[in-house]
Amino acid sequence: MIGEKTAESDAFWKLVCEEKSITASDYHCLTFGDPKYQDYSDHITELAIKGIKRATAHLAIDFELNNVIRRKKGDYWMILWEDLSPAVIVELVNVEECKFEDVSAEFAAREGEGDGSLEFWKKTHEDYFKLQLTDWGHEWSDQLKIVLESFDVVMANPARPV
């Protein structure tokens, strides 16, 4: 997850708050993944905008090691394109933590990637998480804590339709 608030993201947040009558004063502003470990973030972002992807997962230590504030239910997250411009605002409807081995088929389907199966989810996420862990000097284990975030789309950026 990379990104930070900019004048462009603040302007989009203001538009969303006005159009959707949102009174929250703050939002998180990050990509789905780190381009250092993947080259398909924009594809995943498009899936979210279309309502196919309604969840995402992170290693719990990602938040700690990279000083990323943990999101909670009710928070708003501006998901960024790979070029770090605003793509879509989502509202977190559930945030939970579990071991990698305990991720459910229902959650994998909600992620909406690939064929939606738990097998696909585990393979792609294990591969991605192993890249991160190697870079951070940590070992892989299916016992690692994973943060599971489910969300609903609030509004996509009309300046860049998909």
Image (cartoon, rainbow, N blue to C red):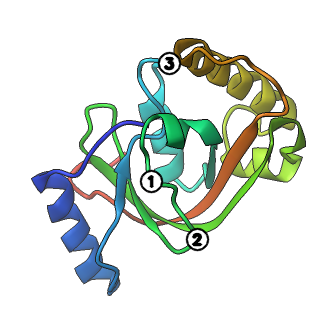
Residue corresponding to mark 2 = 73
Residue 50 position within the rendered picture, expressed as x and y whole percent measured from the top left? 51, 52
Query: Residue at 63% of width from left, 42% of height from top?
Result: 60
140 over 8 or under it: above or below: above
* Quadrant containing the C terminus in the rendered view: top left
Name the one closer to the observer, 159 or 45.
Answer: 45
Residue at mark 3: 37
Label 2, label 3: how many angstroms apart (C-alpha)? 27 Å
The spot of residue 70 in percent (x, y) is 51, 55
Q: Earlier in the sequence, mark 2 or mark 3?
A: 3
Q: Say what amino acid the circle numbered 3 marks.
A: Tyr
How crowded pointer 3 is (Cα within 10 Å; few <14, some 14-19, many 20+) is rated as some
Pick whichever of labels 3 and 1 is earlier in the sequence: 3
In the picture of the structure, the residue carrying the numbered disc 1 is 69
Task: Identify the residue at image location x=21%, y=62%.
Answer: 12
- Mark 2 lies on a secondary structure that is loop
The secondary element bearing badge 1 is classed as loop
Task: Indicate which label's residue lies in the foreground, 1 or 2.
Answer: 1
At label 2, the amino acid type is: Lys
Determine the CA span between mark 3 and mark 1: 20 Å
